[in-house]
Image (spheres, helix red, strand yellow):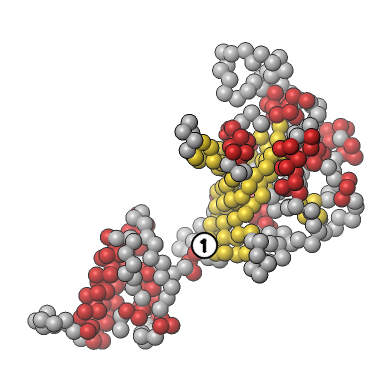
């Protein structure tokens, strides 16, 4: 059941404003395919994003087509949603891939004008079969999506006036006659030397009939039901930030929209290199467990991590010098290391093992330098 009381997803307005600031945006749509040995393989391609389903602002010419060819000029303004959509042709591979992979999808935008990457992971369903709910796949897809439609706050008409058919017709109308004609081009992948056989399938056709049976037979709107949304903000190179939201079924966690913010800002996740920096910056007395910062022992061997590790070596060298200043330099003539020299040695060893062995559980915390 579509509901009126659900709140919009917490990330929706921001993503919408980012899209509005980026004229003519595309996104990458990733699906899961299978190779000849039935092993899963990633498949990705560029598609034109058509915004949040079912709201689409028509060009005046397309609006005119709707008014002339569709009952009441189309649907009333009943619903909104947090579901992004794009249009496609059933003869392309992505729709079969959705069917055979449990509808798994990820959409990725790089919106350079706002220096932000958005990733939307979820399930995608194709609608628009002109045979309607007589076809099981169309019936199931509508059912999956219907629960995620939200009645608009100011809508006071009857919900029954809205139909799926008019919703998809509006997306078809939103294409130019030539673009509509592409849905009756010869099948993608067919050699140009080969006769398409079906005389209805020809290149360069223009379609003005919004119910053209051949074009509409191939046309579909793919609607993405999001489950996890990630925003990566690179606008400040010195303070890159990441947020993540997850749709939750747990009443205890979710907000009114059904989402929880699972990651607020990656810079809050303190790595052990940061711990060193914090120690140096804050100059705190050590020894209490409250000084111990959360430590992320995961590491990778990529270049940026190496830079961080090099930096942290320097930081530790400085920390060692500071500790030595307080405790006194350990004497090299002693056969048994002192408590402080052993700790300094351990500290230096921690840095080198962490550099060489990313899985090392040896980590540096403020309490270790006591
Ligand atoms: C700028 C651009 C926009 C595109 N828009 C779409 C689109 O909206 N829908 C679509 O199905 N394919 C679109 N394509 C083509 C796809 O990238 C892809 O080639 C096609 O969908 C076939 O992919 P598939 O067989 O893996 O499904 C676009 C390509 C480009 C370069």
Q: What residue appears at the point 60 percent right and 59 percent down from the top-left corner?
A: 246
For ligand 1, the image quadrant comes to top right
In this rendering, position of residue 105 left or right of residue 238:
right
Q: Check the image and report above or below for 218 versus 150.
A: above
Location of mark 1 (residue): 241
Q: What residue appears at the point 25 percent right and 71 percent down from the top-left corner?
A: 348
Note whether residue 25 is visible.
no
Q: What residue appears at the point 83 percent right and 50 percent down from the top-left corner?
A: 78
Note whether residue 219 is visible.
yes
Q: Position of residue 273 (x, y in %)?
A: 36, 68
Q: Position of residue 317 (x, y in %)?
A: 26, 73
Q: Check the image and report above or below for 352 versus 117.
A: below
In this rendering, position of residue 72 left or right of residue 30:
right
In this rendering, position of residue 317 left or right of residue 130:
left
Q: In which quarter of the image is the C terminus?
A: bottom left
Q: Which of 308 and 37 is in front in this view?
A: 37
Q: Check the image and report above or below for 203 versus 304.
A: above
């Amino acid at each position: 059941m579509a509901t009126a009381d659900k709140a919009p997803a917490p990330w929706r307005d921001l993503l919408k404003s980012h899209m509005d600031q980026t004229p003519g945006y595309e996104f990458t749509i990733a699906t899961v395919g299978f190779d000849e040995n039935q092993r899963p393989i990633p498949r990705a391609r560029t598609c034109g994003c058509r915004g949040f389903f079912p709201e689409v602002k028509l060009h005046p010419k397309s609006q005119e087509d709707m008014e002339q060819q569709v009952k009441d000029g189309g649907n009333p303004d009943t619903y909104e949603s947090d579901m992004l959509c794009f249009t496609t042709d059933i003869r392309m591979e992505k729709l079969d891939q959705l069917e055979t992979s449990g509808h798994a999808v990820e959409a990725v935008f790089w919106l350079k004008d706002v220096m932000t990457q958005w990733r939307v992971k979820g399930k995608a369903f194709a609608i628009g079969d002109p045979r309607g709910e007589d076809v099981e796949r169309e019936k199931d897809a509508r059912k999956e999506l219907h629960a995620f439609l939200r009645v608009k706050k100011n809508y006071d008409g009857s919900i029954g006036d809205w139909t799926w058919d008019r919703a998809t017709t509006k997306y078809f109308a939103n294409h130019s006659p030539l673009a509509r004609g592409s849905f009756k081009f010869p099948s993608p992948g067919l050699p140009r030397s080969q006769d398409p056989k079906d005389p209805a399938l020809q290149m360069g056709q223009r379609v003005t009939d919004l119910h053209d049976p051949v074009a509409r037979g191939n046309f579909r709107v793919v609607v993405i039901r999001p489950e996890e949304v990630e925003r990566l903000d690179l606008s400040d190179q010195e303070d890159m930030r990441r947020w993540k939201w997850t749709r939750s079924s747990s009443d205890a966690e979710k907000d009114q929209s059904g989402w929880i913010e699972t990651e607020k800002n990656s810079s809050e996740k303190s790595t052990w290199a940061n711990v060193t920096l914090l120690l140096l910056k804050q100059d705190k007395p050590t020894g209490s467990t409250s000084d111990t910062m959360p430590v992320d022992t995961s590491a990778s061997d990529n270049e940026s991590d190496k830079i961080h590790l090099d930096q942290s070596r320097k930081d530790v060298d400085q920390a060692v010098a500071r500790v030595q200043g307080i405790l006194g330099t350990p004497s090299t003539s002693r056969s048994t290391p002192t408590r402080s020299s052993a700790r300094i040695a351990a500290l230096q060893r921690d840095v080198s093992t962490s550099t060489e062995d990313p899985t090392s559980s040896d980590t540096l915390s403020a309490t270790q330098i006591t």
